[in-house]
Image (cartoon, rainbow, N blue to C red):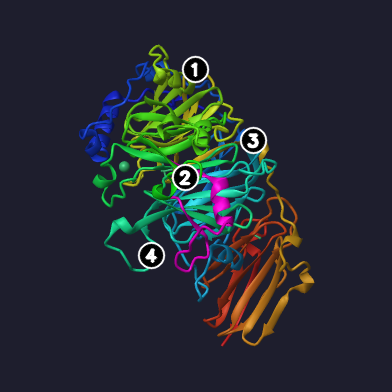
Amino acid sequence: MSSDNTPKIDTPPDLERRKFLNTAAAVGVAGTFLSAGLVGCKKEGASTASDASAHGAAGGAHEVAPGTLDSYYGLWSGGHTGDVRVLGLPSGREIHRIPVFNPDALVGWGITNESKAIMGTKADGSLKYHVADTHHVHGSYKDGTYDGKYAWVNDKINCRIARMRLDTFECDKITEIPNIQGFHGIFPDKRDPVDQSINYTTRVFCGAEFAAPLPNDGHDMENPEKYHALFSCVDAETMEVRWQVEIHGNCDLTASSYDGKLAATNQYNTEGGIKYVDMMSAEKDACLFFNIARIEQAVKDGKFKHYGDSKVPVVDGTPDANKDPKTALTAYVPVPKNPHGVNASPDGKYFICAGKLSPTGTIIDLSLVLKWFDGELKNINEVVVAEVELGLGPLHTAFDGRGNAYTTLFLDSQVVKWNLEDAIKFYKGDKNAKYVVDRIDVQYQPGHLNASMSETMQADGKWLAVGCKFSKDRFLPVGPLHPENEQLIDISGDKMVLASEHPVRPEPHDFIIVKRDLLKPRQVYNLDEFPNAVKDPKDAGVFRNGNKVTVKITSMAPAFSLSDFKVKVGDEVTIILTNLDKVEDLTHGFAIEKYNINFIVNPQETKSVTFKAEKPGVYWCYCSHFCHALHLEMRSRMFVEA
Ligand code: K7E
Ligand code: CUA
Ligand code: CA
């Protein structure tokens, strides 16, 4: 391979271009708050931005040779595509997409009866929703690390939470959360708050970003003071909503503590504003803490109400009802202006709030939050152990397990590496504590970032992925819509080193990076998992019950067990297809010409579709997934009799 083909991954960004981007962002995105002046904060103890050109390439450590497996799974939320993407890291190769909220033609998601039952349908059998906006993906925990069982993802538009099984990488349940809008942050718990022998995930916490009248039935529409947001808890196994908390302000991101006792959400709209100027009028917003054990006791004690048709108990978490720390369900911790992101440090000690409209990071000591709930602190502000300057537009924070945090700076187009204990020392008055360790330019305007295993107690400090919202000139132009730029940074040394980048379809938001040996995916299904499986080609045939017709078919390369089947115009036809091939990777498809049907069946899998036979004639059914030298010949015919 000629060196001309080698991607230049270590070229320092053109400084003029970077200046332009920052100016553009300042004017277009954040001009208002910048010109309005930044919130005052303590000056940082250290460090000018390091020269990007000082960084070499990462020595090819990110390169994964053909035929070689990656060492991490990345689970990336898909954004508008309503799916979850599976990337191999450090290569950045996209291995798989898990369809979740939106239809997907490959696996027949939204086409098969089984997927429609998960996605939700209207009375006429059509899908209830066709769009979604996924933001946050998190895995289930055991003993403070991923157990490889489940992952969850949110849909902000239609307020749904979906669960994926990580043995088959499929969505198996979707729940719509009642009485909320703008469902944004999610985080599984990591332990039970009361019974500490339950050392695994049993709940998922869900934040609502938008407030609305409760119930939202047409009253008080013009009166924002009557709008409320709810924080919800979903059962990790049943996926039913266990309880909700009515709060003041709104929820944005969500975090959970390693001891299971606390969950939190950062709030950027404590003002209850409707327009952005109103939402940024206060100097401080809050990080809102939830005392999980007390909330569940209040539910047990019957101290709740219901809203609308929902049966979910709603407890009162508003400030007025929670003034006494010793009985409070919630604690509102003031943090600077419109924070974004709340992240738990892997040592279990701290939550970090990024300032967004304030150039600061706030460190909250969780042991002090628990002390406040015990009535042992005079003032809630004492739980903040540091509030230090990081740079412009801090959004999200990841960790390396060596005491350092990495925060994206949206406006500076940088990632800043900072040391938590040094930041605490600096905030306490030690002006020699140089808490900023390093800075690196990214291309450009980063939102989420995450480090390998960062959201677990096994944070290993090897790789940092950064989701850059703007890619500008980093890739071949493909028209007005630009991809996002996922950059990979080697964080194994003191200095961050940009290792590689790859484009992704907009726009993933959040992701997690999981050590590959924590997941144990299966390669083949088991026939017995499907109650409707057609286990023997001899069981194939057409079974009529009035005008309802069931067609049972099996596939085994290179043939379907029926070379034709007859139905009548007006019939409601259900086709059940079982793939009897047992060989790993031997997938068949089933597409019916002119009937808008296509789906695949993996080895030993069964799927079904139901449709109305409306048009008479011969319709070829063919295998739509390359399976065999005679793949093109693998067909059947549907005869629809007039
Ligand atoms: Cu994009 Cu997590 Cu929805 Cu921040 S959120 S950037
Ligand atoms: Cu079966 Cu292609
Ligand atoms: Ca605000």
x, y (%) of residue 272? 31, 50
In terms of image quadrants, where is residue 562? bottom right
Residue bearing mark 3: 67
Q: Secondary structure at mark 4?
A: loop
Question: Mark 4: which amino acid?
Answer: Asn
Q: Secondary structure at mark 2?
A: strand
Position above or below: 371 against 219: above
Residue bearing mark 4: 216
Front residue of this view, candidates 496 and 16? 496
Position above or below: 467 against 558: above
Category of crowding for the residue at label 2, using alpha-carbon neighbours closer than 10 angstroms: few (below 14), some (14–19), many (at least 20): many
Front residue of this view, candidates 423 and 580? 423
x, y (%) of residue 350? 50, 31
Residue bearing mark 2: 330
Distance, label 4 to label 1, CA atoms, is 52 Å
Mark 2 vs mark 4: which is more N-terminal?
A: 4
In the rendered image, the quadrant that contains the C terminus is bottom right
Residue bearing mark 1: 494
Distance, label 1 to label 3, CA atoms, is 31 Å
Distance, label 3 to label 2, CA atoms, is 52 Å
Query: Does label 2 point to a residue whose CB lies under 8 Å from ligand 3?
Result: no
Please say if the residues under marks 4 and 1 sit with CB atoms less than 8 Å apart: no
Q: Secondary structure at mark 3?
A: loop
x, y (%) of residue 406? 46, 28
- Horizontal side of 489 relative to 211 (left or right) equals right
Give, as a single range, the part of the protein colored magenta: 288-317
Residue most extreme to the left: 35
Q: Residue at x 59, y 58 (%)?
A: 173
